């Protein structure tokens, strides 16, 4: 049934949902990679769709918005109100390590955060991890496609324009791969409700090398990553 933030009907979502941050990116994914799709959500401009892959597997795509509080709302409602079993976040990130390059794909096996979001669970600090089988499936697909990838920990940050421009170096020292703003809440919520979750990221910015992709390059890199995410999703659809 509809929730305060999703106006889809009970069976409108598939068991597996791809979740980019940007609603327009969700629309692009559906129009580019799915067929016979329908729009199932539009509340607050957060677009959601359900359709079929080229292999006729039913999956959904819905935006998460930006940041931990936003994705925390949407993944909670998808898991608890719509019987979604698997959410794969597909996004972009900034890299913290010298051995990582632009266009590389990061499989985030775990996530740390500087947010106090985890305190709701009344534990000192919660380690948030992806689902192993989901991560392994994506890893095997990426290796088969010979795409450059890295597996490890990501930082889910609360602040985009940080007052301390060197704060990232503390995380880099601990071999954290890079930074985005959503994975921690997705992983924690999935753990809470015994569901599956994975974050797959394309590197679009580099903190050490001071490089970034153009808009055209971002589109090319994201398309390859989305293909991997869809192929992974099909295994759990």
Image: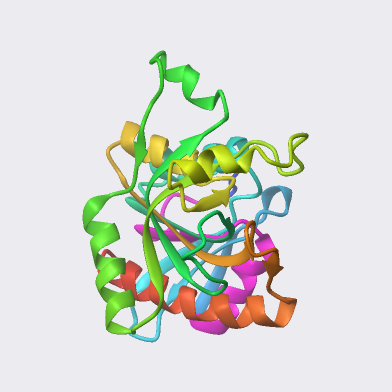
- Image quarter in which the C terminus is found: bottom left
User: Is 13 placed above or below 71 here?
Assistant: below
Regarding residue 115, the answer to whether it shows in the image is: yes
In percent of width and height, residue 32 lies at 56, 83
Q: Is residue 138 left or right of residue 161?
A: left
Q: Is residue 231 left or right of residue 68?
A: left
In percent of width and height, residue 48 lies at 57, 60
Q: Residue at x 73, y 76 (%)?
A: 215
Residue 29 shown in magenta: yes
Image-quadrant location for residue 59: bottom left
Q: Nearer the viewer, residue 145 or 100?
A: 100
Residue 196 shown in magenta: no
Q: Residue at x 45, y 68 (%)?
A: 105
User: Is 233 placed above or below 93 here?
Assistant: below
Q: Residue at x 71, y 44 (%)?
A: 160
Image-quadrant location for residue 95: bottom right
In percent of width and height, residue 202 lies at 53, 67
Q: Is residue 15 left or right of residue 172?
A: left
User: Is 169 placed above or below 34 here?
Assistant: above
Regarding residue 1, the answer to whether it shows in the image is: no
In percent of width and height, residue 11 lies at 41, 55
Q: Which residues are magenta?
A: 9-35
Count the numbered circles shown.
0
User: Is 228 placed above or below 1 here?
Assistant: below
Image-quadrant location for residue 17: bottom left
What coloring was used for the rendering?
Answer: rainbow
Q: Nearer the viewer, residue 111 or 13?
A: 111
Q: Residue at x 45, y 43 (%)?
A: 186
């Amino acid at each position: 049934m509809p929730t305060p933030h999703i106006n889809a009907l009970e069976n409108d979502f598939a068991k597996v949902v791809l979740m980019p941050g940007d609603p327009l990116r969700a629309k692009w994914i559906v129009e580019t990679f799915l067929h016979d799709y329908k729009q199932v959500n539009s509340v607050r401009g957060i677009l959601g769709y359900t359709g079929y892959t080229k292999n006729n597997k039913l999956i959904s795509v819905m935006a998460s918005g930006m940041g931990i509080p936003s994705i925390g709302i949407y993944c909670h409602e998808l898991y608890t109100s719509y019987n979604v079993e698997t959410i794969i976040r597909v996004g972009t990130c900034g890299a913290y390590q010298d051995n990582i390059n632009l266009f590389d794909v990061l499989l985030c096996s775990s996530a740390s955060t500087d947010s106090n979001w985890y305190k709701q669970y009344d534990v000192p600090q919660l380690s948030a991890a992806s689902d192993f089988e989901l991560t392994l499936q994506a890893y095997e697909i990426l290796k088969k496609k010979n795409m450059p990838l890295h597996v490890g920990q990501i930082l889910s940050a609360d602040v985009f324009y940080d007052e301390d421009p060197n704060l990232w170096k503390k995380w880099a020292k601990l071999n954290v791969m890079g930074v985005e703003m959503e994975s921690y809440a997705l992983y924690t919520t999935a753990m809470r409700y015994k569901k599956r979750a994975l974050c797959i990221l394309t590197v679009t910015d580099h903190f050490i090398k001071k490089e970034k992709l153009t808009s055209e390059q971002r589109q090319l890199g994201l398309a390859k990553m989305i293909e991997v995410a869809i192929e992974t999703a099909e295994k759990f659809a």
